[in-house]
Amino acid sequence: MLTIGSFFDLTDFPDRELFADCPYVWVPLKQLKAYIAGQTAPIFQHLCIRDAVPLDSPYIWHNGRLRNARECIITYGDTTKGGLSVWENGQFLEGASVIMAGAVIVGRNIKIGKGVLVESGAMIKSPAIIGDHSEIRHGAYLRGNCLIGKRCVVGHTTEVKHSIFLNDAKAGHFAYLGDSILGNNVNLGAGTKCANLRFLSGNVKLRTDSGLIDTGLRKLGAIIGDRSQTGCNAVTSPGTLMGPDCLLMPNATAPCGVHPQKSVLR
């Protein structure tokens, strides 16, 4: 019930090795910092990009090279459906990613896939991994050690800290995710908050049919299985584990613990 396979299908996830040999579904969070450090390199080496200073021009990342995009023609289609396109001197730059003017980059160890869009006003703190065709929207805040899969959305004023998005996971509006994992095709309603720190000191512990399990983590947000959804202004308590195909209704608070597949939380 608490295994990786009980929550997620990792068949198409680019970083599935992070989940290998994990006895419990929260263990990848313990390994996340070291994993990202091993997968990222200081690629954002450009004389015009300075830490914590908004970009004064759009930039593109293409074929391992970061360069100014002032002379490019950019079409801002649906990023998650491959609709972002970049042309330079009449040549189509297949797989080019765009970082809009006004975005803020802190640190250089950031790995960006193909067809990624980082909108103006977003802040990304190194280290981070952002997968193909994902969208980091205006006002989004990636606080470091964030692993974003393919075709994901980190939305307007959404804050993400030390968390994992599997493919097609979306937190589109006003969300907070701390020390959490979103499964494939998870959708968070506007205003969803995944709390990660208990009022009381000590590690997060889970009550299960087999007894109390100490996660070994002082901070643990939500583990949300594939295709699960939350309604607007929903809240998950620290240590909330929702299996696949669950629903957390609007304005509801999910209690700490394990909620099996297809649960409806009100």
Image (spheres, rainbow, N blue to C red):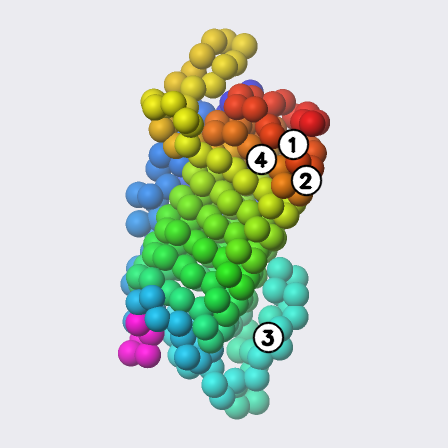
Graded by Cα atoms within 10 Å as few (under 14), some (14 to 19) or many (20 or more), the crowding at tag 2 reads some
Q: According to the image, label 1 marks what residue?
A: 252
Look at the image and give the residue range highlighted in magenta. Answer: 46-50
Residue at image mark 2: 231
Foreground mark, 2 or 1?
A: 1
The image quarter in which residue 41 lies:
bottom left
Cα–Cα span, label 3 and label 2 = 33 Å
Instruction: Bin the neighbour count of mark 4 within 10 Å (Cα to Cα): few under 14, some 14-19, many 20 and up.
Output: many
- In depth, the one of 96 and 224 nearer the eye is 224
Amino acid carrying mark 1 in the image: Ala
Q: Are marks 2 and 1 in contact (CB under 8 Å)?
A: yes
In the rendered image, which residue does mark 3 sit on?
A: 85
Q: Which amino acid type is shown beneath numbered disc 4?
A: Val
Residue depth check, mark 4 versus mark 3: number of the one nearer the observer = 4
SS for dot 2 = loop
**Secondary structure state at the residue bearing disc 3:** strand
Label 4–label 1 contact, CB within 8 A? yes
Q: Main secondary structure of the magenta part?
A: loop
Which residue does the image show at 42% across and 46% down from the upper left?
161
Residue 235 bears which disc, if any? Answer: 4
Disc 3 marks a residue whose amino acid type is Ser
User: Residue 212: where, in percent of width, then height?
Assistant: 45, 12
Q: Position of residue 136 (x, y in %)?
A: 52, 60
Q: Residues within 10 Å of mark 3 (few under 14, many from 20)?
A: many
Q: Amino acid at mark 2?
A: Gly
Q: Is residue 49 magenta?
A: yes
Mark 2–mark 4 Cα distance, whole angstroms, equals 9 Å
SS state under label 1? loop
Which sits in the foreground, 76 or 197? 197
Instruction: Measure the C-alpha gap from mark 4 to mark 3.
Output: 37 Å
